[in-house]
Amino acid sequence: MSEFEKNVFMKKIIITIIAALTLFASQGCARVRNDKTGKIEKTEAVAAAQTAPLVALINEYKSCDGFEVVQLGRFGTSVVKSLIKAAAKSEVDEDIRDTFRIISGIKRFAVVEFDGCSSDVRNGFISKVENILGSSELLMEVKDDDDQLKMYGITSSDGSTVSNFVLYNPSDNTLICLFGTISMDHIARMME
């Protein structure tokens, strides 16, 4: 894949994420009911419980031939956010500022492409991903002929944020995980 194709691919992913988040933000999906108060809320423990299996699975498969994995933990993500923040301060481009506002709550991320591996390894990974995500709330699913894109996450009780956003495209052998919180207000401002 050429550098131009990679840039176009990443732009498509970002646009898809923004459009999807805008569409389902007000739906209030994937909320958790507090057993003591009966109130619906999102907790850090629930978010962490959903993050751990995906991170473990990615780490299990990242050394397999044909897997392309980019992961940034808290430190790497904070460095990237610092660079974007510096660019946002020095640039007059409002898109850079909006991008920083949107990603400011992301603590770590992972991008996995697994189309270059053997079919046995790919099928095993797909099976495990679908098993993990099967217990999560599906926020949105987009189907176009044989292409399928599934989006998972946790929305806050008031619909103002989405946490642990996962884009999964089994037909393109792609998994994108954004661990942290994304503000819907910032996305709405960027869409104006």
Image (cartoon, rainbow, N blue to C red):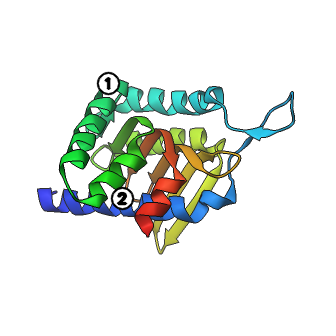
Along the line of sight, which residue is nearer the eye, 5 or 179? 179
Q: Residues within 10 Å of mark 1 (few under 14, many from 20)?
A: few
Residue on which disc 2 sits: 13
Q: Residue at x 19, y 53 (%)?
A: 91
Mark 1 vs mark 2, foreground winner is: 1
Q: Which image quarter is the C terminus in? A: bottom left
- Under mark 2, the amino acid is Ile
Q: Residue at x 73, y 38 (%)?
A: 41
Check residue 133 in the rendering and tell me which mark sits there, or answer none.
none
- Under mark 1, the amino acid is Phe
Residue on which disc 1 sits: 75
- Label 1: element kind: helix
Pinpoint residue 95: horizontal percent, then vertical percent. Answer: 30, 59
Tag count in the figure? 2
Pinpoint residue 102: horizontal percent, then vertical percent. Answer: 42, 49
Pinpoint residue 179: horizontal percent, then vertical percent. Answer: 47, 37
